[in-house]
Amino acid sequence: MTKKIILAALAAPCLAASLPVQADAAYRGKAIETIKRDFQPRGQADLDRLAEDGLQTICNRTGNNPPEYIAKRLEADQMAAVKYPADGKLMGDWKKGEKLAQSGRGFTWSDKPGLPVGGNCYNCHQISPKETAFGTVGPTLLHFGKLRGNTPETQKYVYSKIFNAKAHNVCSDMPRFGHVDALKPEQIKDLVALLLDPESPVNK
Amino acid sequence: MRKPRILGALCAITSLGIAHAQTAEVDHAKADAEFAKFRAEMEDSNPAELFELKGEELWKVKRGPKSVSLAESCDLGLGVGKVEGAYVQMPRYFADANAVMDAERRIVWCMVEKQGFKFADIAKKPFQGANDTNPPEITSLVTFVAGHSRNMKFAVPLKDPKVKEIWEIGKEITNYRAGPYDFSCNTCHGSDGKRIRMQNLPNIGTHEGAVKGVMGWPGYRMTGGVMLTHQWRMNDCFRQQRFPEPKYASDTVTALLTYMTANANGAVYKGPGIKR
């Protein structure tokens, strides 16, 4: 029993120590000290936003490229916390989804606090062919459903990806919209429809 | 003469914006080229020059509780009162303050230490808001100092170990992901050829990207018609990153400006500019 506890206590720092540290540890430490000193709350943006969660720490320490066994474990943890809608339906209304995808509002100190917030989708992705002012930080989603169909598995993939992109790619650039309660299940369903509904302009 | 030209230019840029939203992606490069052409045409009536003149007056006049001028008391790194080439050689280490400082922070330091102004008063409203008729004095002062580095090469003294350390810290700050959306500076500014909507995102870790990042600051922003500094740009990035607000003239902002400006070393600074 005692042995087990000692082993467990030893294992945690060993795991951290064995990470290939790309970030220079000394400068990273100083950067964090500097950040902790230099910010003030404004609007809804409180100082607690400066703290890393476990996943952010791992991504920050490894240049967004942790060893595979750690990535897999973290992805599984994130996936386990994905909540699916109570009614079991994953596709909502693509028209509402399109509206949501257009909005980049939410969570900045100049935004009105609280929900709803925008989906931010067009900031980074090409989606409907009608919207030409799209970003390129993420991959194009044009013809997403046309290319992949909309089987239950695909719906589940898209829903879980929007709910928590890190469940699929641990250090993805994409926010965890459901995980941080930015988007509600109904909203995520509408975005799933935008990508997968055959009637959505995305698939025309 | 100046006013109608600016108005005409505003109309041109507005219609450019509308065309921008309606046309396809291929037109994006064309619109960028148009803006570059427009910017070049504006050069002889650049609104930023108005603030250079205002800043020059503020630099030379005896002011503050101690009634001294910055011209006779402020050392921007090249000697007291010397502004020629100072902007492109900051951030740098200042022994009297025992800190690496960017241009804006250094001028604030001089206003506090030499002229006797209160830091809290300057920090209360450091940037021009959309409804303000004029930018704060500090913005005009920075614009004046920056104007006296026009057509000079960026030369942040990275060989100074104290500057190099701040550069390293700045680099680490660009990597730091946190907040509700897991964003870092590098989420948007860490790779080549990315956009948010139609806005190109310079990769500030590369020389080419850093040049795009530093050029044109301080700048007259067509949106809202306000004069803003590079410090402001850092502040607004953190807003969009969903972070809380960086304190004015803080180490974090200096570190980012050190990282970005030193990465642009060798490029010729075109002077205070015009921004969309």
Image (spheres, coloured by chain):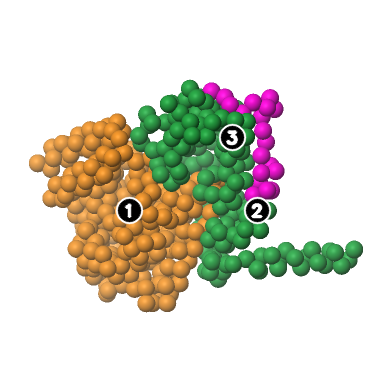
Chain letter for mark 3: A
The nearer-to-camera label among 3 and 1 is 3
At 24% from the left and 55% from the top, the residue drawn is B272
Find the distance from the CA under tag 3 to the CA under tag 1: 47 Å
Indicate whether B162 appears above or below A147.
below
Out of A124 and A153, give the one closest to the viewer.
A153
Q: Residue furthest right?
A: A1
Q: Which chain is orange?
A: B
SS under mark 3: helix
Q: Which chain is green?
A: A
At 19% from the left and 36% from the top, the residue drawn is B12
The nearer-to-camera label among 1 and 2 is 2
Where residue B37 appears, x then y in whole percent? 17, 46
At 28% from the left and 56% from the top, the residue drawn is B215
Read off the magenta span. Answer: A74-95
Q: In the rendered image, which residue does mark 2 sit on?
A: A72
Q: In the rendered image, which residue does mark 3 sit on?
A: A154
Where residue A89 appears, x then y in whole percent? 64, 26
Q: In the rendered image, which residue does mark 1 sit on?
A: B229
